[in-house]
Amino acid sequence: MAERLWAVPWQTVSMEVKSPTALRIGILGAATIAPLAIVWPASQKVDVVVTAVAARDLLRAEDFARRHGIPKVHTSYEALLSDPDIDAVYVPTPNGLHRDWSVKAMKAGKHVLCEKPFAANKEDAAEMLKVSKETDKVLMEAFHYRFHPLAKEMEKVVLSGKLGKIVRIDVAGELPSLFVPDHDIRYNIGGRDPKLAGGALMDIGPYAVNCFRLLARAAGVQNFEVVNVTAKEKFPKVESWLKAEMTAGHIPGSITASMEMSLLGIFKARAVVQGELGTMTVENFIVPFVYHTLTVNMKDGSSESVQQHYDEEHRTTYHLQLDAFAEAVQRKQQRKQPIFDSAGGTPEDAIENMDVIDKIYTKLGWGPRVGY
C-alpha cells in the first residue's frame, strides 16, 4: 500500500504555469472531502484551477482558502455563483442541498460537478437533469471510482461470460464509526435536521447501489426490485446500518451500507459476483488507487487469478474524475456532445441510482429522503 501511495503524483503546478484558458472552479462549501476530491487533483493540472471558495462560515472559508492556496473567498454561495471569473462549481454540500445549489449554479451559467448522492431523491435528480438541458451546462455526479481501470475490469469480467450465468450479486460498503460521530452531518446533526438527507444509505450506500447496478447491467439486467430491507436507527429515520435484499431481473443479491463498524474496524468496499462457473470477488472498489484485489475463482478449480489494475500514470480516482469533467466542459464549450466514457457520472445514471435508493427507503417504510 505504501508503495502505491508513493507512486501517486504529488508535484503541483504553480499558478504562474496554469493555462490562461484553464477551467476555473469554485467550491461551494469547505467540505472535508474537497481537498482530496478537487483541490489536490486541480493543483496538478495545467488546464484546471480552483479560484474561489465559499462556506456558511466565512472564517472557515478563509482558513480553507489559506491552507489550500485558493486566491479568492466569497462571503456567500450566491456571491460565488455571481462571480464571472468562475466557469464551474464543485458541490460538496450536505446531501439535502445538492439539488438546490446545483440548479442555482447552472442557472447562473456554471457547469456542475456534484458530489454523490446526486440529490435527496429521484424527483430532485430529474429536476437537475431538466435544468442541465435547459441551460446547456455539464452536470456530472462525482462517482470517482467509476473512472478507474478497476471498474472497467470488473465490468469486463462479467461481460466476458467467464463466470457463466450470474446467479447472485452482493455489494457492501462499510465505514468505521470513528469517522462518523453522532453530531455529524451524515447523521443529520444528531437527527435534528431531516432535510440534510443523511444516513448510511446516503453516505457510503450510493457506492454500493451504483456498483450493484454496474455489475447487474453487465449481466444483462436493467430492472431492479427491493425484496426486503432491515436497518438500525441511530436517530429517528436515520440509519447507521442498512441491508437491502435485491433482485436484478432473475438475479438475487444484496446491498449493505454501514457506518457503525467498531472503532478498530477497517474500511470495506466489497463486491462479489457469483456465476454458475465461477466467482469474482473485488476488494476496495471505492478507492482502488490505494490498494485493491480482483480475484476470480472457477468452480472446477482450473483457474484462479488475483489481479490488480492501476492507472498507467498512477493517478487517483479523483484525478481521473477531474480529467473527465474538464474534458466534458471543454467539449461542451466546443459545441460537441460531452462524453463520460463508459463510466458513471451522467445525470441519467444518477437518476437511476436515486430510483433504487428511493425504493429501498420506501420498502423500509420511511419513504424517499426529502431535501431543501
Image: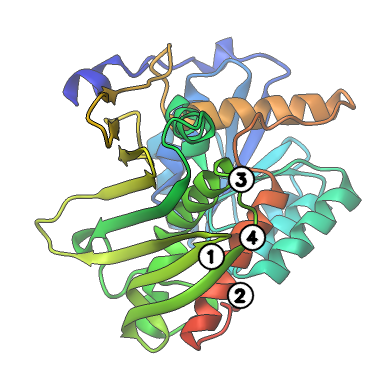
Q: Which residue is mark 3?
A: 220
Residue at 41% across, 54% down: 168
Q: Nearer the viewer, mark 4 or mark 1?
A: 4
Q: Amino acid at mark 4?
A: Asn
Q: Amino acid at mark 1?
A: Asn
Which is more toward the observer, 150 or 160? 160
Q: Are marks 3 and 2 in contact (CB under 8 Å)?
A: no
131 w.r.t. 270: above or below:
below
Q: Which residue is mark 1?
A: 95
Q: Are marks 2 and 1 in contact (CB under 8 Å)?
A: yes
> Is disc 1 placed on a helix, strand or loop?
helix
Expressed as whole percent of the image width and height from the top left, the position of residue 17 reads: 57, 10
Q: Amino acid at mark 2?
A: Gly
> Is disc 2 placed on a helix, strand or loop?
loop
Q: Which residue is mark 2?
A: 371
Q: Amino acid at mark 3?
A: Gly
Report whether 26 appears left or right of 205: right
107 w.r.t. 68: above or below:
below
Distance between the alpha carbons at the discs numbered 3 and 4: 10 Å
Which is more toward the observer, 263 or 216? 216
**Label 4 environment density (alpha carbons within 10 Å; few <14, some 14–19, many ≥20):** few
Residue at 37% across, 46% down: 274
Upstream in the sequence, badge 2 or badge 4? 4
Distance between the alpha carbons at the discs numbered 2 and 1: 7 Å
For residue 223, the mark is: 4
Residue at 50% across, 45% down: 215
Upstream in the sequence, badge 1 or badge 3? 1
Q: Nearer the viewer, mark 2 or mark 4?
A: 4
Report whether 306 appears left or right of 134: left
